[in-house]
Amino acid sequence: MGGVIELLAAQPFWFWAGLAVALLAIEAGTGTGWLLWPSASAGAVALLAFVLDPGWTGQAAFFAVLTLVTTFGARRYFPRGGAAASGDINDTSTRLVGQAARSVEAFHHGEGRVSLDGKEWAAHLEGGGALAADAEVEVTGVRGSILEVRRRR
């Protein structure tokens, strides 16, 4: 065991490169995103140790600071997105909000049908009233299986 510690002390690049690979392997297995940045930081420290060799304390301090900065920076500037982050990934109706649709028939008393993405939906017109057939509307919300729409400007 003493030979390994002496090797690591003499060749810190291999310690940090090995740590970077190990963290990346664990990250690939879990897919959490939390170990990606420490892995990158360990790789950066490996390069620093290869070029400058600031000693173990300098390497550890650089790794700690770089890990904190990259992890929190990534959480701020690369937030997780997509349907999984916004709630139920099986709820496709939320994707309809903001989409343009066409009225299939004339609306009477604010009720009618619209065509969107090749599907026909029951719709309720904001403010009620009438709307001609083949008029362009915008989906503003979904209430069960009924789309809330408004006249497109």
Image: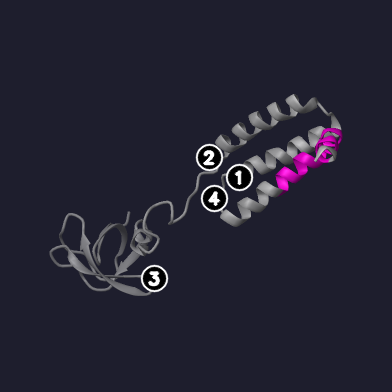
Disc 2 from disc 4: Cα separation: 12 Å
Q: Type of residue at label 1?
A: Leu
Q: Position of residue 107 (x, y in %)?
A: 19, 67
Q: Residue at x 75, y 35 (%)?
A: 45
Q: Residues within 10 Å of mark 1 (few under 14, many from 20)?
A: many
* Placement of the N terminus among the 4 image quadrants: top right
Occupied quadrant, residue 130: bottom left
Which residue in the structure is indicated by mark 3?
117
Residue at image x 71%, y 39%?
42
**Residue pointed to by mark 1:** 35
Q: Quadrant of the C terminus?
A: bottom left
| Amino acid at pointer 4 | Thr
At label 3, which amino acid type do we have? Asp
Residue range highlighted in magenta: 4-21
- Which residue lies under the disc numbered 2? 75
Q: Secondary structure at mark 2?
A: helix
